[in-house]
Image (tube, rainbow, N blue to C red):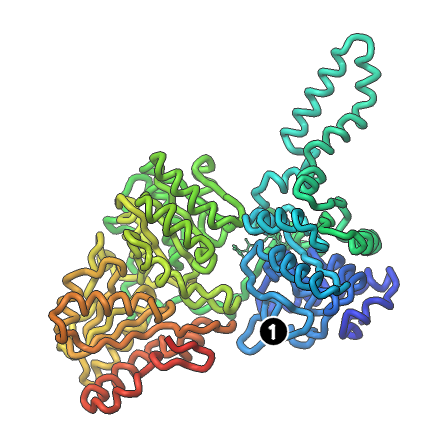
Amino acid sequence: MILEHIDSPADLRTLTPDELAVLSQEIREFIVDAVTHTGGHLGSNLGVVELTLALHRTFDSPRDLLLWDTGHQAYVHKLVTGRRDQFTHLRQEDGLSGYPSRTESEHDWIENSHASAVLSYAHGMATALELQGSERRVVAVVGDGALTGGMAYEALNNLGHSGKRVVIVLNDNGRSYAPTVSQLSLSLTHLRLSPAYVQARQRLRTLLRELPGVGELAYSGIHGLTSALREVVTPHTFFEALGIRYVGPIDGHDIGGLEQALANAAEWPGPIVVHVLTQKGRGYAPAEQDDVQRLHDVKVTASVPDPPALDGPDAPPAAPVLQNASLSVGGAEIAEDLPLTTYTHAFTRALLIHAEADPRIVAITAAMPGPTGLLPFEARFPERFVDVGIAEQHAVTAAAGMAMAGLRPVVAVYSTFFSRAFDQANLDVGLHKVPVVLVLDRAGITGDDGPSHHGVLDMALCLSIPGMTVFAPSSAPEVEAMLATALTLDGPSVIRFPKTPAPVVVPGAEGSGLNARRVREGDGSVCILAVGKMLGPAEAAARRLSDEGIDVTVWDPRVVSRPDPAMLADAAGHALVVTVEDGVRQGGAGMYLADALRLSVPLGTCPPVVTKGVPRSFLAQGRPDRILARLGLDEDGIVRTVRESLAGLQHPSELRSPVGSELPRSGETPA
Ligand SMILES: Cc1ncc(C[n+]2csc(CCOP(=O)(O)OP(=O)(O)O)c2C)c(N)n1
């Protein structure tokens, strides 16, 4: 096996073309095998095998700086830079990161894994190297999907203007998650098939034929002419107008051809794009046959948390939750057979129902229609579905425009990527008070993808936007009830929920409108305000504490931005209030609610409030339930906090050392 002998990029440089072909095959088998066990980004990595080998044979990493946009396609790079043995623990706690990681290797430079940023890093590095008089090369690999993100254009424009020496490898597989939604991408890869080109070509043919005398002659020269036409509208023109040299397209699976193009590009004294065509999922039939995503990423069932148990003493009745009033909006039958096991499914289903009844509803995704649950909406209402590409900022501002012009836009993005669009949410949506509904999926601790993908900032960000109504559903029916309310509001709103399975609750037990919900009435000692999915562990903790004689009140605040006066009045009557959330503690929901509580009662009469949440630190990958348990954000942790806090109240001196996750942990910057 050749792969067994590849411990560094230098080992690649002695291989013959035949050996490289064998190695490529071995790498594909290795990656399929590894990802089958751990989950991860499959299709993207299978597509860049030859490209990665060619890059490492042409450039001298880490002397030359090899940068990967997003970084989800860096498995091959990891394999050939000495990390083969760690793939058994890919994306596991304390294992190999699913993205480049500076602690893992000197060959890794950037690890933010939010798309479209690499060209800006490359500009910065090239600027520094030039100032230092260094001959080290900067090579940035960017996908056609990532090129739909606005940051990429800012960097291209600046690179072209400044003339910085960067080799930009445009890895064009025509896909983002789903097929890339981009006019540039169409021009890049599908020019000959694109309607505009075909029409222009057809018009040219007709025109030439009709020219008296020379028509037939000119018609036979159509190839030359259409080539010229192609030059007018191709990427050549696009990039060169920005001041960037363009070469390509190059077959991304021909190592020899790639090396030649890359070596030539390395000699170019300014920015240069090497346009490489690759096939996402190449060499693995299930990926090649996956028409939409080409198995962009795969999950492993074993690492997915189990859905909530539906039997046992505490089990809710297995009644069909969705037959409640909030769903009896017209057209319910269209969504009846969608499974309701996650918050995302609940959102999909509710959105379909409302969209059926209200033609003003449009759905917007930033290149992730599948993971955000919008594919059924796209299938049902293609004309009301908008994929803007990896362009969260544009998604939010475009939604503001749609709302201004009378539509009811629903923007579905991951919580972590929403951070990109904060300014847009604040000013374009918030300041203009337009009724945009932001649906933030994968909120809280997400797990496998590590620090860049935890959605822990959304609460803190959204609660700071004036007029933004912030909903935190604690169950699937709550998603539906909240979407129903959000769609009636005059101003903007956010519904944020996690990836983990959504609890099933007794029909009718969900809240309504902007009210909070008391789910358990205690004896006045302790009141827990449990935000979103933390309601489950809080209720479980309350049941356990009641066995110890501590009868806890539990509230589901539901609408965090507008704390229900009834909830505040009730909480104020307790000896201790505990807030629990799965987002960042500093500036998060707990502090917001605690502040509201303080302001709702006369000075000096507010009960002590303990706020539990995620510390201000970058948390590595791991199973969400284990990360939450480590942070004390589970049933055990809540029980501990209540016990210790009550003890502290009885012995105030102990309160000097705060309890639970209030203590800054290692790596956490104290507030
Ligand atoms: C700002 C941001 N939004 C969304 C994502 C989720 N995401 C990860 S990879 C990807 C597609 C990237 O497509 P492309 O750059 O063409 O790379 P490919 O996987 O096709 O090689 C998306 C949308 C992200 N990482 N960052």
Q: Residue at x 39, y 38 (%)?
A: 402
**Left or right of 290 on screen, residue 129:** right
Please indicate whether residue 186 sits to the left or right of residue 593 in the image: right
Question: Which quadrant of the figure shows ligand 1?
Answer: bottom right
Q: Is residue 135 visible?
A: yes
Looking at the rendered structure, the number of numbered marks drawn on it comes to 1
Q: Quadrant of the C terminus?
A: bottom left
Between 448 and 573, which is closer to the camera in this rendering? 573
Query: Which amino acid, mark 1?
Result: Leu
Q: Quadrant of residue 31?
A: bottom right
Q: Is residue 32 visible?
A: no
User: Which quadrant does the N terminus fall into?
Assistant: bottom right
Q: Where does label 1 land, which residue? A: 96
Q: Position of residue 636 (x, y in %)?
A: 33, 81
- Whether 635 is drawn above or below 403: the answer is below
Going 77% across and 52% down the picture, which residue do you hit?
269
Dot 1: element: loop
Location of residue 74 by image quarter: bottom right
Check disc 1: other Cα within 10 Å, few if <14, some if 14-19, many if 20+: many
Q: Residue 351, percent across and down?
A: 36, 46
